[in-house]
Amino acid sequence: MEISRLIEGRASSDIISSSVETPVRDAVKLLASRRIGAIPVVEGGQIVGIFSERDVVYRLADEGEACLSRPLGEVMTSPAITVERSTTLLDALALMTRRRIRHLPVVEGDVMCGFISIGDLVKARLEEIQHEAEAMREYIRTA
């Protein structure tokens, strides 16, 4: 399965993102209120980084609460690791495992068209496995 199938039906306008000027304090509130683990950081319509829970923890450990006033552009993980719509689910999972990340922006050219989490990929993969198992059971039953 390709990522395009995973994000079909999702509007890119529904992606929660922030700008490079957004203070860390505001981004943390956004993560908490939306119960999400990361947000893409966008500048001029282009994805320039990702701000995640890990970024918060690392900055707090290094700088204390002073980091909460800094703009995301100074603390985000950059450059963002991205995938294309044509990337397979297994390739995206392998990339996330290899790079030890949990969120991926999906891009089409230079434009972000989706944002997926490892939870999205695991859920889709489990559904694939269940479908394959059911098809195998049906094949055995009718053979």
Image: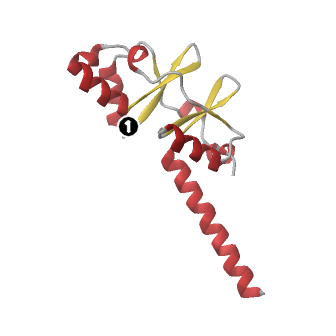
Q: How is the image coloured?
A: secondary structure
Q: Is residue 4 above or below residue 134?
A: above
Point 45% across, 24% down: residue: 77
Placement of the C terminus among the 4 image quadrants: bottom right
Q: Is residue 75 above or below residue 86?
A: above
Q: Nearer the viewer, residue 74 or 14?
A: 74
Mark 1, residues whose alpha carbon is within 10 Å: few (<14), some, or many (≥20)? few
Measured from the top left, where is residue 26 in percent x and y? 33, 22
* Kind of residue indicated by mark 1: Arg
Point 41% across, 12% down: residue: 21
Point 58% across, 41% down: residue: 95
Instruction: From the viewer's perspective, tell me whether residue 14 is left or right of residue 113.
Output: left
Instruction: From the viewer's perspective, tell me whether residue 143 is left or right of residue 97.
Output: right
Return the residue at label 1: 34
Instruction: From the viewer's perspective, tell me whether residue 27 is left or right of residue 63.
Output: right
Measured from the top left, where is residue 96 in percent x and y? 53, 41
Secondary structure found at label 1: helix
Point 54% across, 36% down: residue: 104
Q: Is residue 42 above or below residue 32?
A: above
Measured from the top left, where is residue 1 in percent x and y? 69, 52
Measured from the top left, where is residue 82 in percent x and y? 60, 31
